[in-house]
Amino acid sequence: MSYYQQHKDTLNRAVEAIHQRTFYAQYPEYPSPKIYGETADADGRTKFRNLVGKKFTELLQEHPSTWVGQEESPYMQEPLNIQYPQFSNDVLISRALETFHQWRKITPEERAGILVESLERIKSRFFEVAYATMHTTGQGYMMSFQASGPHAADRALEAIGSGLEEQQRFPQKVNWKKPMGKYQIHLEKEWRVIPKGISLVIGCSTFPTWNSVPGIYASLVTGNPVLVKPHPGAILPIAIFVSEIQKVLQETGLDPNICQLAVDTFEKTCTVALAEHQEVKLIDFTGNSEFGNFLEGLSGKTVFTEKTGVNSVILDSVTDIDKVAQNLAFSVVLYSGQMCTAPQNIYIPESGIKMGDKSISPNQFAEKLSEAINGIVDNPKAGPFVLGAIQNKNTCNRIEDAQKLNGKIWLASRSIENPMFKNARIATPMVLQIGADQKEIYSKELFGPIILLIKTKNVEQSIALAKEQAETNGAISCGAYTIDEEIKEKIADQMSLAYTPVSFNLTGGVYLNQHAGFSDFHVTGGNPAGNASFTNPEFVIKRFTWVGLRDCVS
Amino acid sequence: MSYYQQHKDTLNRAVEAIHQRTFYAQYPEYPSPKIYGETADADGRTKFRNLVGKKFTELLQEHPSTWVGQEESPYMQEPLNIQYPQFSNDVLISRALETFHQWRKITPEERAGILVESLERIKSRFFEVAYATMHTTGQGYMMSFQASGPHAADRALEAIGSGLEEQQRFPQKVNWKKPMGKYQIHLEKEWRVIPKGISLVIGCSTFPTWNSVPGIYASLVTGNPVLVKPHPGAILPIAIFVSEIQKVLQETGLDPNICQLAVDTFEKTCTVALAEHQEVKLIDFTGNSEFGNFLEGLSGKTVFTEKTGVNSVILDSVTDIDKVAQNLAFSVVLYSGQMCTAPQNIYIPESGIKMGDKSISPNQFAEKLSEAINGIVDNPKAGPFVLGAIQNKNTCNRIEDAQKLNGKIWLASRSIENPMFKNARIATPMVLQIGADQKEIYSKELFGPIILLIKTKNVEQSIALAKEQAETNGAISCGAYTIDEEIKEKIADQMSLAYTPVSFNLTGGVYLNQHAGFSDFHVTGGNPAGNASFTNPEFVIKRFTWVGLRDCVS
């Protein structure tokens, strides 16, 4: 039985979920022993430990020119000493070109089947991937498991399903008969999916699989060979994905170089040369705006980016301010604000946030938010695990700089102890209150656990500023709290015009940072934060071209 | 009854046709009195004559700054003296912005209904549009009717149907309930279609409606206000379309400036300033590669182009060489080669074209093709009407230059008499034979009735050259004649990799120049000829962005 036959139901359910957009998950997000096996966690940890300090030999790419690896654990602040095979750009490109024709010539269904099979195998390695993610990104255990494992796999499946559907959208062949009065024209028409060519997927240091697998799988399902260029600081999680893809390819009799890992070092990156290479036609990128803009400007390439953004929260009126503060506090503490969807600028009218006939002043809210943050941070059962560690030392410098800014510090960043990792690089969120006139402070992304409370004249100004920030500096998420239907629609309308998704009145166990596969589109484009667009149809359609053939029958 | 209700069946049939891709036409292509009315032709001609020499007052755009118009009839080689209202770019942009919110806030269904209604009204003006097209583009009567009337309207309907379908692809709202063990998260999720903004559609002088209406209707149905910037030499046909769109908009209580005509003059074009304007987000362009490449390079815009290309014909083996010569001759004579899909480079192996156990040498084919061309040109019932007239004097200069090239002229270009228009600018096709080594001659578009017969070593070289030309200089069509299944697949595969549609073995009444609505994709992208992509899903999807909203229920 082919992998397509074997996974046909999974693919059908995925496509149905894409269109229904109700809750759907193929891969369970909770690391439960009942689901994943009693020893799965311990086994995964052991496997991860066995990878540390060695050559990573699972890739099926032959004859490396050398071995490199510079990952460091933010929890231990010491090198992992894992070495990966490195290849010259020429070798990577020529191998990709060699595999292209093999890969494009099998059917979209066969490609989709092979790719789902790779996800099923990765499923058995979710725990290993989770530990690999912890010790490269600094994410907490739970997020490492969820984001790098099931959530990433769901996003990958979404891309496969969407890509397969688009390729099946038109008939392969039709008999086209045009009546011409006394005779008819009869053509046999055929339409072929022609992939764009080599795809380069450039990863980031904080979400090495979640942000990369949609592009990898979308390019692969549409017939393009892929070069996966991870961030030098976070290679292992995606290396495990790539190795599983390669194994399925080889077992199917295909060239494993259809999906190659392209590692480099901090000192000598291969990214620019690969991106500029004329044979590279597709680029997926997650990272800073400067490099993202450079990539978007390359001519003759189709580029999908997720860059920096300034996410806003608009506070107007609430039913329970404590629940709001708790919800936002969690969003802020979660992975120390190192998420592209984390809030940064919280706009509060100077007249306060309406609650019944009361009004919560900006200062009162600042206190409540700071207390709620401390409540999580200082809870030994939550703090260290929700915060995780700081991936990049520069983030700590940024916090230090922010603490010197001209504003009122309601909560200073500090370190806490992680009971399991005494040497972890930890920084708790800081809360700084400034005025709406201090645009120079809040008009840029301050990546990390830095929260700005911005006092505005009124909610109209809050909306205008949030919109302006999204239009000017990009935004990937927006939170809003209002129980006034008119203001709600105004926020929805205005932020939509800045192409920014809005989450209203979130309390309880759902956070604005979370974008769910099969339901929430992510960075659909239209503002400077990028056009990653997973997974709306654009994300897959732009990776291939329809070509029609006509044959004269009579 | 709303226009959507009224035209719902038409829209449903259009969407079905897009997916079935069997023959479909909403608007009958033959100017038959039985279909369009006994007096339709005469009435259309009278109406056209009444427009000549006057101000065109049908547009609902108020307070022009001045009136301009420089169209000339290629049949009479004298000015039409029709004047159109002109507006400053500032007025055009500010009016478009004013209408944007009105237009985006009605439903996609309402927009689609209004737009189909406009096509139904334009249907009653097909003959007038035909005469307007003849006397601006130089097309023959039949092509003027078909291309500017029914074929353009079918392409427009295709864009409306495709745009409506994409906007209906995901639910507007869903209840999203995620089980979390002891509780569940309940969000109400909503997805909105957010149009990109002002759309600029830049027309060409040869197909003023066919090449422009897909972009106009695709942008409109997805909620974008449109500025229609016709070529200063071919305004009237599209002015009639725009005026009908404006009338329906006004009758529906909407601002007619949702679709504005933006005319300019040869001496002082408004195109660059409009294209570069930061509020212009979408650009559709048909014309030369130099300007098309400039537009594609503008940052922050979504650009659809149809530029120049070098279309090839590959001759390998045939069942009846005379039928092949006749078919190609018609393709060449049709509108004097002034179609983006017209063939230019015909590759013939030096060993000849196989037919049974015979072989037709390149010289023999050159003679046959020249004879077949003369057969049409010198047939008084066909020649003047199929040839039409030369739109632009520069095309005549290009022919003169081509006749001085280093090759064997099998057929020289000449003029013939058009019995109805003694002063028509006419140039019959020229046939020049050159060698495969004379790349400097055949590696560029020689727009107009210039045919190059290129002698190659063998069919493999023919394929390689046709592919190389497509990849390097672009191609919109390709013809191939072979009865060898292996060679056929090789041509199909190789030309597909250059993203060029191939028509095989066309004889009889079907020509490689013709791309049919609802069936043949047109310029799908991937080679330098452009990415107009009507109407594959990309053509409409890229004109709007999905934005999601989430509302916490519990």
Image (cartoon, coloured by chain):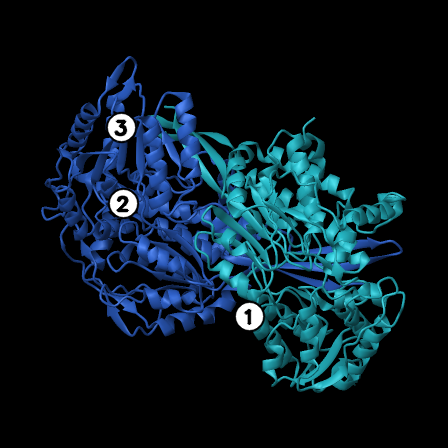
Chain colours: A blue, B cyan
- Marks 2 and 1 sit apart, C-alpha to C-alpha, by 42 Å
- Give neighbour class at mark 2: few <14, some 14-19, many 20+ (Cα, 10 Å): some
Point out the tag, 3 or 2, that comes first from the N-terminus. 3
SS state under label 2: loop
- Marks 1 and 3 sit apart, C-alpha to C-alpha, by 56 Å
Q: Are marks 2 and 1 on the same chain?
A: no
Mark sitting on residue B471: 1
- The residue marked by circle 1 belongs to what chain? B
Residue A267 located left or right of residue B90:
left
Mark sitting on residue A348: 3
Mark 2 sits on what residue? Answer: A444
Residue A471 at x, y percent in the picture: 38, 42
SS state under label 1: helix
- Marks 3 and 2 sit apart, C-alpha to C-alpha, by 19 Å
| Residue appearing at x 75%, y 68% in the figure | B336
Residue with the most extreme front position: B66
Return the residue nearer the eye: B536 or A60: B536
Tell me the kind of residue under disc 2. Answer: Lys
